[in-house]
Amino acid sequence: MADTAPLQRVLTAGVPAVSTAGDDEDTVIAQAPFDCTVVAVEYVPEAAITGADGNSRAVSVVNKGADGAGATEVAALEFASGTDASANDETALALSGTAADADLDGGDTLQWRSLAVGTGMADPGGLVRVTVERR
């Protein structure tokens, strides 16, 4: 039973601030502890983020695979106008619309990506939580 019972783990990582609006940042979150499916991703920023159109910030979790060369986007959120985040409060990222994109093999590396859209805006950094469930 132990090998087939549902098991969830929450992978957490601190993610750095991106203080210059036009800069991007990639940060390793963790490696998948076993074959699993990502069931939720949350970002807890250290300061409030107010979305804007044209020049904003997009954040995502990318499966880099076991060899670090993967590019599958697991979950994403763009802080466009009307999409805001409160300081020290979790904000959910939308999981990919393709169910297979959420599947990880044990040892796959998850990466946090913070990208400037247009000329961008600052990212205060904070905490990312990825909830995985054994499959």
Image (tube, rainbow, N blue to C red):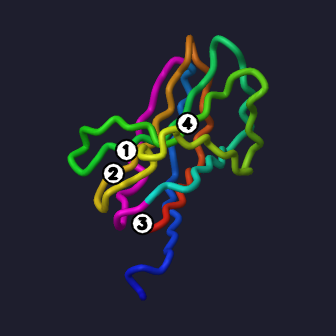
> CA–CA distance between discs 2 and 1?
6 Å
Give me the disc on residue 76: 4
Q: Earlier in the sequence, mark 2 or mark 1?
A: 1
Read off the residue under disc 1: 63
Q: Which of marks 3 and 4 is nearer the N terminus?
A: 4
x, y percentage for residue 47? 71, 40
Q: Is mark 3 on a helix, strand or loop?
A: loop
Residue lying furthest bottom in this view? 1
The quadrant the N terminus occupies is: bottom left
Numbered disc in front, either 3 or 1: 3
Determine whether 97 is above or below 134 in the image: above
Give me the disc on residue 135: 3
Q: Which of marks 3 and 1 is nearer the N terminus?
A: 1
Q: What element carries label 4?
A: strand
Instruction: Return the residue nearer the eye: 117 or 72.
Output: 72
Question: In the image, what residue type sits under mark 4?
Answer: Ala
Task: Place residue 20 in its image quadrant.
Answer: top right
Question: Which residue shows up at 42% across the image and 79% down it?
Answer: 4
Q: What element carries label 2?
A: strand
CB-based contact (under 8 Å), mark 2 and mark 1: yes
Q: Is mark 1 on a helix, strand or loop?
A: strand
Per the image, is 26 magenta? yes
Question: In the image, what residue type sits under mark 1?
Answer: Asn
Q: Which of marks 1 and 4 is nearer the N terminus?
A: 1
Determine whether 132 is above or below 83 in the image: below
Give me the disc on residue 109: 2
Instruction: Return the residue nearer the eye: 29 or 96.
Output: 96
Give me the disc on residue 28: none
Per the image, is 81 magenta? no
